[in-house]
Image (spheres, rainbow, N blue to C red):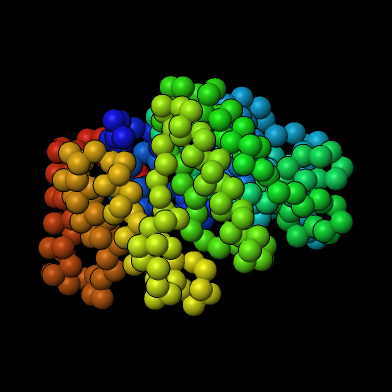
Amino acid sequence: MEQTIHYGDGLLFLGSCFADEVGGICRGLGFDALVNPFGVLYNPASIAQSVERLNSGMPFSHDEVIRVGEGQYCTFSHNTAFWRPSEEALLEYVNLSLGTAQEHFVMAKWVIVSLGTSWVFRNKGNGQVVSNCHKLPADQFERHFLSVEQSSEYLSGIVHRHPEKQFIFTVSPLRHLKDGLHENQLSKAALLLAVDQVCKRFGNAHYFPAYEILLDELRDYRFYKEDMVHPTEQAVQYIWERFTDFAVDPKEKPAMQAAAELRKMLKHKPLFPESETYKRFEEQKQKKIIELKRDFPSVCLDNF
């Protein structure tokens, strides 16, 4: 890529669990990153809807609230982590989150999108694609496969409407086994073809091959957790290193190393907090914070 990520650039991660993983590492190293403000998203339609919501900033209303469990409420735009015990509590929470996310989106230079599946669920009541079914009865939804052209149209729309931003697309290597093995392969293939069309069409759209790295480079089940679906920490770290080589300016490596060292110190839990050894450790930690602020002022310490 001609342009690369720097500390101080606003980053927005949207999409599957892979976005959570890589976005979380970015935040842990002090990048100005916001990760999945609506919760985990999987398909191009839901991601496009979320981007447009961030762009408009239109608050969520009572008309969008649904009862999702016994005494719980949410919207079809959010995942289950947003469940709240009343409509009022839900709207207060999601609109506060939306306001913060919209501010970040406006100033963000980079939008990193991790696509999980081409399969979507439409609400039979209004035909809208939902981001999450919230365990509601299956007869309320219609399952639909987005064609290459449909996915390309959704993704092209957000890239075209935001030429001031750089988009990095990736296809999540996590298999959606509930779809079936063959259906999962068709789903991933359609996403790959759609993203390829978008990246060929727009100069501010780029592709990072996370799917190929895990399946073709690592391609061994020792890089998967016990569920044989999610990658291990070792695999995530490997993909993260490849992502930094691909997207992050090499000049930022000293800042990343300093941030990683400080984060490790901050996570340290002492066995003997009253000891002289720990007091010296605390002094070194405060010294490290001062040095990092001085040498790398664009690092967001609040994200540690």
Q: Quadrant of the N terminus?
A: top left
Whole-percent x and y of residue 200? 45, 32
Q: Which residue is drawn at 61% across and 24% down?
A: 56
Asked if residue 241 lies left or right of residue 236, the reply is left
Residue 85 in sight in this render:
no
162 or 261: which is nearer to us?
162
Q: Indicate the position of residue 142 as horizontal and vertical percent values.
A: 81, 50
Can residue 91 be spotted in the picture? yes
The mark total stands at 0
Left or right: residue 157 versus residue 124 is left
Q: In which quarter of the image is residue 182?
A: bottom right
Is 202 rendered above or below residue 150?
A: above
Which image quadrant for residue 44? top right
Could you say where residue 167 lies in the image, as x and y percent from the top left? 44, 34
Query: Residue 115's x, y, as percent?
Result: 54, 48
Q: Residue drawn 87% across and 42% down? A: 125
Instruction: Judge from the rendering whether residue 160 lies leftward or rightward of residue 261; answer left or right.
Output: right
Name above or below for residue 190 compared with residue 9: below
Q: Nearer the viewer, residue 198 or 45?
A: 198
**Does residue 15 sit above or below 217 in this rendering?**
above
Residue at the spot 87% in from the left edge and 56% down from the top edge: 139
Choose between 88 and 151: the one closer to the eye.
151
**Can you tell which quarter of the image residue 193 is in?**
top right
Q: Which of 28 and 47 is in front in this view?
A: 47
Picture residue at 39% right of the left edge, 62% below the top: 216
